[in-house]
Amino acid sequence: MTDLSIQEASDIARSYRIIRDKRKRRATITKHLFLAICSLVMVYPLIWMIVSSVKPDNEIFGNISLWPSEFIWQNYPDGWEGLFLSFTVFYKNSIIVTVLAVIGNTLSCSFAAYAFARLEFKGKNIFFALMMMTLMIPYHVVLIPQYLLFLKIGWVNTFLPLIVPRFLAGDAFFIFLMVQFFRQLPRDLDEAAMIDGCSPFKIYWAVILPLSLPALATTAIFTFIWTWEDFLGPLIYLNDIRDYTVPLALRNFISQDSVSMFGQLFAMSILSIVPIFIFFIFFQKFIIRGIATSGLK
Amino acid sequence: MKKFFAKNGPGYFFLIPWFIGFFCLALGPILYSLYLSFTKYNIFKPPKWIGLENYEFMFLYDDRFWKSLEVTFSYVFMSVPGKLIFALAVAMLLNKGMRAIGFYRALFYLPSILGGSIAVAILWKQLFEYNGVINTLLAKIGIEGPYWLNDPNYSLYTLVMLGMWQFGSPMLIFIAGLRAIPRELYEAAEIDAASKWKQFYAITLPLLAPVIFFNLVLQMIDAFKTFSSAFIISGGAGAPLDSLNFITVYLYNEAFAFYRMGYASSLAWILMLIIAIFTGVAFFSSRYWVHYENERD
């Protein structure tokens, strides 16, 4: 039996370690390279759109470069006034609808969630099951009857069909999200408040809500993004250009068939996603946590 | 009676918005939609009961319906697996405490959050124009790109790519799932000299099965409901040659372009059944391939 001397053994160990580290480093570099290429492919379309929004129109197509020969900033003000009405109107409409939808959804969903998470009443389990079942129903099935209903009560061509349903806790997903959150809060708080003579409403408002800001924020952020991007709802309910939200106005831009307005079209497209982008930058933490824990889109 | 309300009152009070929403905007519309699917209804005259005629026509004579199913299914079966595989691959790369993970995560997620917007659909359409960026790039490596948007053999791929571009949200869910797998398992496998590939299918895949399942169901339901991007890219009508006539697009046009509310309702019900069946199959089959960690068998 041959014994390795300590010296020999440590030499072997060291050379092994060097090889391993080298391999590891190479693997890390390959990984970063791969990810960098991926990121480039991912963001290239967005960057191309941004650049195209200031390119002369004849440089947009058949051209992959990301540097325009001259910067046509004029595309922005021209695009803003490019339709029959100015985008000021469309932004105003979008903001009205979105802000009210966010308020409505956050309030009404937290209302229902509080009942399901904290209060006892007859039929709770059945209602909860029904609520969860509405998660599965595609919007398209209720679309036509809802349209007929709103048509009948004269709400078509107003913002009401886009806003009022939000006040009626229609988003089971967020109710569920908040139920999960409320259940984690210690019950002692409610009991202490109840002993102090607080009504259930007071408990909801002064105890539960302030402690649930993360869940409320997640709901508000996603409602904001989805409402802002919503296309089908406005497409069906808003027919007068004065009521158009930004996505509808953008569609008008492309259906106008003017060949020479691509720069302006891109300029307005960029502006339309700026609010979402800002939200994303500021609330990244909430958004990423919201998805990772609950599978929001 | 008084006692009943004292006990249950607060719960019902908090559920009032949800009750109204549930009955007026979910349950009622669903039932009414079912009724309408057995009628002929053009809004101007009251619905006329025609029994199963809508379904009969749909299944026996309506080629456009079958085409829309083919398109929708092709889209789902191409985009969802592609998206999930890509999401998992990137999530695994991002998993192991690497530098700049937050940066990559945000970057890869960005398309998911912008992807539903009309701006991105417009961008996509321009990218795939015959003289657009994609073909210009292909020409650089000597490939003559097809007429993506006008050739029915290629048009669907543009949407599949748009779907896959938005792999960010399943990726985030995968990252969260991968974090939950105990490190010791990999360390033990490493000691037993198990190859990376072996580690992947003996540890990662089985332990990630619940997350894969969750992602699969969510993404499938979502893919079946694709509307805005298909609507914009196909010019609103599912063109060319119905190759982008997703069932949602078909339904929209039947209802709101041609006012065939009855027929559109039966399409909506078919869509709902398809989603229900797929979700059901996923849930049922999950028994055989998804094992939860705290479950003993």
Image (tube, coloured by chain):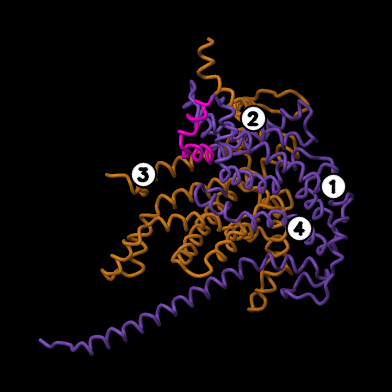
Chain colours: A purple, B orange
- Image position of B66 (left or right of A123): right
For the residues labelled 3 and 2, the Cα–Cα distance comes to 34 Å
Callout 4: chain: A
**Helix, strand or loop under label 1:** helix
Residue at 52% over, 59% down: B82
**Which label sits on residue A89?**
1
Residue at 62% over, 59% down: B111
Which residue occupies the foreground of this view, B12 or A38?
Answer: B12
Q: Residues within 10 Å of mark 1 (few under 14, many from 20)?
A: some
In this figure, which residue is indicated by the disc labeled 2?
Answer: B25
Which residue occupies the foreground of this view, A243 or B100?
Answer: B100
**Helix, strand or loop under label 3:** helix
Q: Are marks 3 and 4 in contact (CB under 8 Å)?
A: no
> What type of secondary structure mainly makes up the magenta span?
helix
Where are the magenta residues, as a range? Answer: A176-196
Which kind of residue does numbered mark 3 sit on? Answer: Arg
Q: Residue furthest left?
A: A1
3 or 4: mark nearer the eye: 4
Q: Residues within 10 Å of mark 4 (few under 14, many from 20)?
A: many
Q: Are marks 3 and 2 in contact (CB under 8 Å)?
A: no
**Helix, strand or loop under label 2:** helix
Count of labels shown? 4
3 or 1: mark nearer the eye: 1
**Which label sits on residue B287?**
3
Callout 2: chain: B
Point out the image quarter for the C terminus of chain B: top left
- Image position of A156 (left or right of B215): right
Q: Upstream in the sequence, badge 1 or badge 4?
A: 1
